[in-house]
Amino acid sequence: MPRALILLAFLLTTYCPPATAQLLRPRPAFTRADSLRGGLTPLRTCYDINYYHLDVKLDVANRALSGSNLFRFTATQDFTRLQFDLFANLKVDKVEYKGQPVPFTREANAVFVTFPQPIRQGTQDEFRVYYSGQPTVAKRAPWDGGLVFTQDAQGKPWVASACQGVGASIWWPTKDHQADEVDSMLISVSVPKGLKDVSNGRLRNTTRLKGGYTRFDWFVGNPINNYDVALNVGDYQHFSGGTYAGEKGPLTVDYWVLPENLAKAKTHFLANVPPMLKSMEHWFGPYPFYEDGYKLVDAPHLGMEHQSAVAYGNKYLNGYLGQDRSNTGWGSKWDFIIIHESGHEWFGNNVTSKDIADMWVHEGFTCYSEALFVESQYGKQAGQEYIHGQRRNIQNNGPIIGTYGVNQEGSGDMYDKGSNLLNMVRTALNDDEKWRQILRGLGSTFYHQTVTTEQVVGYINEQSGRNFTPVFDQYLRHPGLPTLEIRFEQDKVLARWIADVPAFDLPVRLRTKGGEYVALPLTTKFQPLAVPGLTKDNLEVDTFNYYIGVLVE
C-alpha cells in the first residue's frame, strides 16, 4: 500500500481530534454514597490500620457468611468517631470495644462508630466488628463484585471472592480504601466438611470444629490491599512447584487445583510460572512477597491478582481463553492469565494506587509486563510487535485517569493504551538498560506503598533526566491522540504537535524511506525538520513504536 494511503488509513482508524475528545464521555453524576466509599474524610484518615483478623464462617447451602473482623490501628489524631465499611445488605450484629458494645450508625455502605472516650493521637487500639448475612453474589466475576457460588465437575461446592473496583466491603467489614493497606493480617475461614479454603499468605493452622466445619488460618506477613484479600473454597488438591531460585533466595511456589485439573495443572503451570517469575524479576525486581510465597489457585472465574494467591480460571489454555489479544501470534504462546495476573504482584499489589482513579498504575504497567515477557522469551522485536498489536483493543473513549475521591476508575484504555504509552517513553529515552533500572526502581522506591500518578511520573522524570509529565498528561488525562502535523512548503519542511496539553513535547522518529530513523525533539510550535532530502513521497514516521496521529500537508 502506498505510504500516503497508509497514513490516511491510520488517521481514519485512530485519530481523535483533541478539541472534541472530551465530548466522547459525559461526566457521570456522583452521589453521597460514592463520596463515602471513595473519599478520605477525617473519619477515615484518623486511624491507620495495622492488623486485621478476619474470622468468617461460610454457609454454602444458604450462600451466607457470619463472623467478625478485628481492627487493630494507630490513631493519627485525636478522635471519638470513625468510619469503616460494609455493604448495607450485610448486617452489623455488634461493634465491640474493650469488651463492651459501642454505638454505631449506618449510611449507605458506610458504618460510623462512636467511642466512649477520645482515642488520643499515637495510641494503638482495637475494636471488633461482628457481622452476618448473605453477601452479593457476583453474576459475571471478575467484572462485577461479590462471591461466586458454583460446583466443580464432581458436583462439590466451589466458592470464591472477586471484588476489585466495587470493594472488599461487599463481603467483609474493613476500612475500604486503597490508600491504607493493612500491615499484616490473619484470615480464618471455616468451611463445611470435605472442603478446603485457600487464602492469601501461608497456612498456619487447620482446626476441626464442632458441627463438621474446618477452620483454615492463613497469615499474610506483608501489607495487602483490601480487594486482594480472598477466600477460595472447594475440594482443592495441593501440589508443590518447588522453590524458585529468585533474586532474594528461594521462593516457595504452590498450586491449589480441583481434582479434575490436577494432571494438566502439573504440566501447564510448570511450563508458565518459572519463566514468568524470571521475566518479572528481571524487569521489575525481586518478587515482592517472598515471606508469603507464590500460589496459583483454581478459580470459578477468569482470574484476579489476589496477592500471593493468584486466582486462575483460563481453562489451562494459552492466550486469553485460547485467543491472542494482540492478534500477532505472540500472545498464543503462553497463558495470558498466569502472566498478567501474576504481573500485578509487582504493580497493583506491591505498588498500589492510593485512589482507584489512578488504576492505570496497576493495569498499564501490568499490561506492559506481557510485552516484556514476550521480549524475554522471543526477543525485543517480538515484544514490540506484541505492544503494537495491543492497539487493536484501544478505543480512545475517555481519560485513563478517573475522578478522584468517588471510587471511579478511568477508561479501560488504561490497559493497552497505558502499555503503549510506557513503550513510547522507553523509545524516547533510547536507553534500554536505564529504562529497566527505572522499572526496577519504581518497585524498590515504592516498595509496599500506595502512590499517586504524580509520584510515579515524577520518579520517571527524575531517573530519566527528562520531563515526561506533558506526555503522560496527554495520554492519561485526554482521550485524543497527539497528532504530528508536517507541512511541506516551498523550500522547507515544518512540523509540530497538535495536542490537548500545551507543553506537549515528545521526541519523534522520522526518516526518508529506507534510511536511518532520526529522533527529533518537537513541540506544539512549528519548527523546521532537519532531515535532508525529505519529501511527501519518501517520508516515514515511526508509527510502529509511537501511538500517534500523523497529518501531512
Image: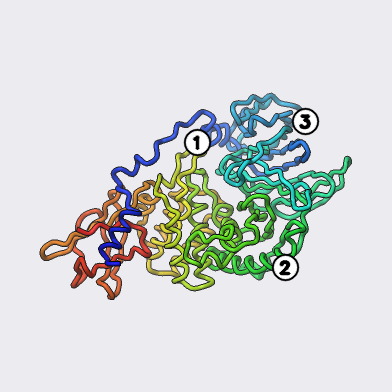
Quick one: label 3, few (<14), some, or many (20+) residues within 10 Å? few
Whether label 2 touches label 3, CB < 8 Å: no
Name which residue type carries label 1.
Val
Quick one: label 2, few (<14), some, or many (20+) residues within 10 Å? few
Residue 429's place in the image compared with 469, above or below, is below
How many marks the image carries: the answer is 3
Q: Secondary structure at mark 3?
A: loop
**Which residue is painted at 51% across and 44% down in the image?**
356
**Which residue is painted at 61% across and 31% down in the image?**
109
Q: Is residue 376 left or right of residue 473?
A: right
Front: mark 2 or 3: 2
Quick one: label 1, few (<14), some, or many (20+) residues within 10 Å? many
**Mark 2–mark 1 distance (CA, rounded to whole Å):** 43 Å
Q: Secondary structure at mark 2?
A: strand
Name which residue type carries label 2.
Gly
- Seen as rendered, the residue at the extreme front is 1
Q: Position of residue 26 (x, y in %)?
A: 39, 36
Q: Position of residue 328 (x, y in %)?
A: 47, 65
| Nearer to me, 151 or 283 | 151
Q: Position of residue 527 (x, y in %)?
A: 19, 60
Q: Is residue 319 left or right of residue 21?
A: right
Query: Which quadrant of the figure contains the C terminus?
Result: bottom left
Q: Position of residue 431 (x, y in %)?
A: 40, 69
Front: mark 3 or 1: 1
Residue matched to label 1: 406
**Mark 2–mark 3 distance (CA, rounded to whole Å):** 45 Å
Residue 544's place in the image compared with 137, above or below, is below
Q: Earlier in the sequence, mark 3 or mark 1?
A: 3
**Which residue is painted at 26% across and 52% down in the image?**
498
Residue matched to label 2: 242
